């Protein structure tokens, strides 16, 4: 990595990896006094998410205990960033759908997760305005996944104990192998 890259990445937070205990903590609501912190945090969260690369990131994934989520599901380079502050699912469909999920905090691990196919979500935008949206498909899955992070829940918690343990063991093995390959400084 060049010195230029180090300087450019200095403000981009690292994404926490399982088994970091902070990923299991319930995040607190954003209040008025947090608005300046949120305004500073949002671009840094997007930078971390895009660098990973990923389509969603919750503040607890970078060690910040705030109910804050950033997402961008846009294809290719057509960025469509979305910020949700204090998101809350207000309605869920009875219809359940299965979709493969992964997570930036469990790199390289994927599994089919069953969730409601449609949801309604109430949240605040960056200006503090109350918003609601109805979502289905990938957007609904992503929102539910990120709100889970705000409650200390990981996608593997929706799996059977057998599948969850297999994924966690594989992640631990992958991380050990990656650490062993890392050159000494």
Image (cartoon, helix red, strand yellow):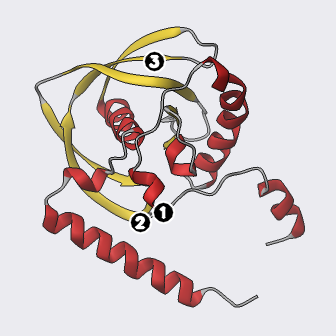
Answer whether labels 3 and 2 touch (C-beta < 8 Å): no
Name which residue lies at 82% across and 63% down: 6
Q: Quadrant of the N terminus?
A: bottom right
Residue on which the image places disc 2 = 19
Answer whether labels 1 and 2 touch (C-beta < 8 Å): yes
Q: Return the residue nearer the eye: 85 or 72.
A: 85
When the figure is inspected, residue 30 is found, relative to residue 5, above or below; the finding is above
Estimate the spatial distance between the alpha carbons at disc 3 and disc 1, rounded to whole Å.
Answer: 27 Å
Q: Looking at the image, can residue 41 be seen?
A: yes
* SS state under label 2: loop
Q: Residue furthest right?
A: 3
Crowding around mark 3 (Cα neighbors within 10 Å: few <14, some 14 to 19, many 20+) is many
Horizontally, residue 173 falls left or right of residue 78, namely left
Name which residue lies at 86% across and 59% down: 7
Crowding around mark 2 (Cα neighbors within 10 Å: few <14, some 14 to 19, many 20+) is few
Residue on which the image places disc 3 = 123
Q: Report x, y in % for residue 185.
A: 76, 88
Estimate the spatial distance between the alpha carbons at disc 3 and disc 2, rounded to whole Å.
Answer: 29 Å
């Amino acid at each position: 990595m060049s010195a230029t890259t180090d300087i450019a990445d200095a403000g981009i937070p690292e994404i926490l990896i399982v088994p970091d205990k902070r990923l299991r903590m319930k995040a607190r609501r954003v209040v008025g006094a947090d608005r300046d912190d949120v305004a500073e945090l949002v671009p840094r969260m997007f930078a971390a998410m895009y660098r990973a690369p990923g389509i969603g990131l919750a503040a607890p994934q970078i060690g910040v205990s705030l109910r804050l989520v950033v997402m961008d599901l846009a294809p290719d380079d057509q960025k469509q960033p979305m910020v949700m502050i204090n998101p809350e699912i207000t309605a869920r469909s009875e219809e359940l759908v299965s979709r493969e999920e992964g997570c930036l905090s469990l790199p390289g691990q994927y599994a089919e997760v069953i969730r409601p196919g449609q949801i309604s979500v109430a949240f605040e935008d960056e200006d503090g305005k109350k918003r609601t949206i109805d979502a289905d498909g990938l957007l609904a899955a992503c929102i539910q996944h990120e709100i889970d992070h705000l409650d200390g829940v990981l996608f593997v918690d929706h799996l059977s104990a057998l599948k969850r343990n297999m994924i966690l063991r594989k992640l631990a093995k992958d991380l050990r192998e990656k650490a062993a390959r890392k050159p000494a400084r």
